[in-house]
């Protein structure tokens, strides 16, 4: 499939970027648009590790928080320029990803819950009052940076473009095929000479760096935040549900998941959070019971019939 | 100090064993992680709040009522969710999401009906004064909860090892395919195990207000992590190993609270990760996962 990769870039990634490049001129809630991009990156980042390696990290938000704190600590403690600090946020997430790489030995639910515990432990460490001098502890972070929403938004779009291109490339490259083989039948794959451990580590770190970079961008835009805000479990859950809803391992699926469900969230979730929580919980249950392959499978089935 | 930490650690350990055992039983039999477990504990706490504090029923009656009622609630929940889930490609992983969804529904429902306020039950209502032990005072309620935990654990043991149903349950835990082949009704046995799991969770919930100080509709998720840590330490899939897990967890938690209080909350998470990585035997020992 040599032509499939450029076709997906042209059919999915470019139109999406174009849409989000135009939207700020017709819609003036820039923060909401940025949040959409943040969730698009998180969903695609999670798609990397779940869709291609089969690991479902409930603690994915840990990378997001690590990015946010890597960014803000570089700015406050080292006085780094924000653009450099964003890269530092990505590096912090990679460092955490390397530290947690032994978790990749675990499978299924063990991995999911262990990564959740790791994200919680990271939050508790950062929010610990004893470390206030370094991290701000439970009192949060206050950054004094020049207000540059347009630059931040463009940066977020760049991160989105890179993440999605990576997903599209994995879908059509030899490396991606090896990963899928390893996910579906690890023993057969390793007998065919695929280095499973290295492949998984690569996508794991790639998905960490995506979340870390976008976490740094989020922190830059927010400037003032509490540790609980950037380690909110809902980031993980939303990313998982958006990805599952659209279909893991596809390129357009998670995009539809974010646009539909995050749109719905902003429509009802903000004014009536408990009704949203109820509806969201029901949606998750119906999704798992009736469409475990996501919306994309629905279209595929129709196409095949 | 040390003796006090150890003594309260054992008491809390017994209680944590009760908190985790239901999750472990469900995992052992069905190979699914019930993330709504913490919410059944929360519902048990609400039941205790009304039956015990509100209506003034005696504590043993409240325990029996909660166990019975939640056992019956567990049966339809099982039939509605689990058979369908087990037909999916990766039931174990999807169970996390499915039961997280259920947990959200329960939490939202309770919050909508009864509000998010923090509730508590004064521990003197359980009767008995504070117990003096090693120069410190320990609330009588803690002893009561530990005692009930011991009774319930013994009940689980009797069920699994001394009854016909229990023997069939253990057969499914050991080898599901063979259990099916020799004619065991897997769904019936699993539904009963699920019911016992929810019943045990609710029983743990009855004492949650005393052991945790207070409760809100949102205590479910942290309790899930605690249960999972307890269950993992004592080896997943073996309900009675949970007693050992609870003890190790309780004692180390109390030691942390005594000597490094500000880092005590980190413990369940670190223990969970540590045990999974260092002693993964029975979980997964190799670098590459099996299919």
Image (cartoon, rainbow, N blue to C red):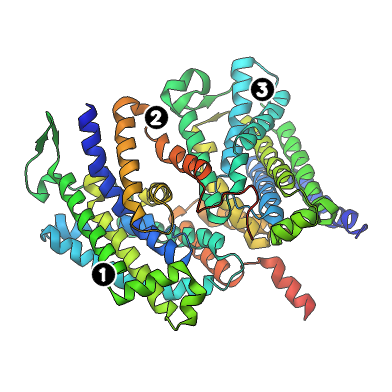
Judge depth for marks 3 and 1 and give the one in front: 1
Q: Which residue is mark 1?
A: B69
Q: Secondary structure at mark 1?
A: helix
Q: Which residue is mark 2?
A: B263
Crowd band around label 1 with a 10 angstrom C-alpha radius: few (<14), some (14–19), many (20+): some
Numbered disc 1: what chain?
B
Q: Residue at x 49, y 65 (%)?
A: A282
Numbered disc 2: what chain?
B
Q: Which residue is mark 3?
A: A146
Judge depth for marks 1 and 2 and give the one in front: 2
Crowd band around label 2 with a 10 angstrom C-alpha radius: few (<14), some (14–19), many (20+): some
Q: Are marks 3 and 1 in contact (CB under 8 Å)?
A: no
- Whichever of labels 1 and 2 marks the residue nearer the N terminus, that label is 1
Residue B155: image quadrant is bottom left
Furthest-top residue in this view: A78
Q: Secondary structure at mark 2?
A: helix
B126 lies left or right of A225: left
Judge depth for marks 3 and 2 and give the one in front: 2
């Amino acid at each position: 499939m040599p032509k499939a990769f450029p076709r997906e870039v042209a059919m999915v990634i470019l139109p999406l970027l174009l849409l989000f490049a135009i939207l700020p001129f017709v819609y003036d809630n820039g923060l909401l648009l940025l949040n959409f991009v943040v969730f698009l990156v998180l969903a695609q980042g999670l798609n990397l590790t779940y869709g291609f390696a089969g690991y479902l990290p409930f603690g994915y938000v840990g990378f997001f928080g690590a990015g946010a704190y890597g960014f803000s600590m570089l700015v406050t403690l080292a006085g780094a320029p924000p653009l450099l600090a964003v890269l530092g946020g990505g590096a912090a997430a990679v460092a955490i990803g390397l530290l947690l790489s032994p978790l990749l030995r675990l499978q299924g639910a063990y991995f999911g819950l262990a990564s959740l515990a790791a994200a919680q432990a990271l939050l508790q460490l950062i929010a610990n009052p004893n470390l206030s001098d370094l991290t701000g502890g439970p009192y949060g972070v206050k950054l004094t940076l020049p207000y540059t929403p347009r630059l931040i938004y463009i940066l977020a779009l760049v991160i989105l473009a890179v993440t999605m291109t990576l997903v599209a490339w994995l879908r059509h490259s030899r490396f991606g095929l090896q990963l899928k083989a390893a996910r579906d039948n690890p023993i057969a794959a390793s007998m065919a000479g695929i280095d499973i451990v290295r492949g998984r580590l690569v996508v794991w770190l790639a998905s960490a760096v995506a979340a870390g970079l976008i976490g740094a961008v989020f922190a830059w835009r927010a400037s003032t935040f509490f540790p609980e805000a950037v380690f909110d479990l809902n980031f993980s859950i939303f990313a998982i549900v958006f990805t599952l809803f659209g279909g893991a391992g596809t390129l357009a699926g998670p995009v539809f998941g974010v646009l539909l469900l995050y749109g719905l969230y902003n429509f009802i979730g903000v004014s009536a959070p408990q009704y949203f929580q109820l509806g969201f919980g029901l949606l998750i249950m119906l999704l798992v019971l009736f469409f475990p392959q996501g919306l994309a499978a629905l279209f595929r089935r129709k196409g095949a019939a | 100090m040390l003796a006090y930490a150890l003594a309260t650690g054992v008491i809390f350990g017994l209680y944590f064993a009760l908190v985790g055992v239901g999750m472990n039983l469900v995992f052992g039999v069905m190979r699914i992680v019930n993330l709504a477990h913490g919410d059944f504990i929360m519902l048990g706490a609400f039941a205790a709040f009304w039956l015990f504090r509100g209506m003034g029923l005696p504590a043993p009656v409240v325990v029996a009522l909660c166990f019975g009622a939640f056992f019956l609630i567990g049966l339809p929940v099982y039939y509605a969710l689990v058979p369908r889930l087990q037909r999916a490609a990766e039931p174990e992983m999807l169970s996390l999401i499915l039961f997280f969804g259920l947990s959200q529904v329960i939490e939202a429902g309770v919050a909508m009906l009864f509000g998010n306020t923090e509730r508590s039950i004064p521990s003197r209502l359980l009767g008995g004064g504070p117990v003096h032990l090693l120069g410190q005072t320990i609330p009588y309620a803690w002893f009561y909860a530990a005692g009930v935990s011991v009774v319930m654990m013994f009940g689980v043991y009797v069920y699994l090892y001394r009854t016909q149903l229990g023997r069939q349950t253990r057969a499914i835990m050991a080898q599901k395919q063979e259990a099916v082949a020799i004619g065991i009704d897997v769904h019936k046995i699993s539904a009963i195990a699920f019911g016992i799991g929810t019943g045990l969770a609710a029983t743990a919930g009855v004492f949650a207000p005393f052991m945790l100080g207070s409760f809100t509709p949102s205590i479910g998720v942290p309790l899930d992590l605690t249960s999972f840590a307890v269950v993992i330490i004592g080896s997943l899939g073996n309900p009675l190993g949970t007693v050992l897990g609870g003890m190790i967890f309780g004692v180390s938690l109390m030691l942390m609270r005594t000597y490094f209080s500000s880092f005590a909350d980190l413990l369940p998470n670190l223990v969970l990760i540590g045990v999974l990585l260092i002693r993964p035997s029975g979980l997964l020992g190799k670098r590459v996962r099996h299919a």
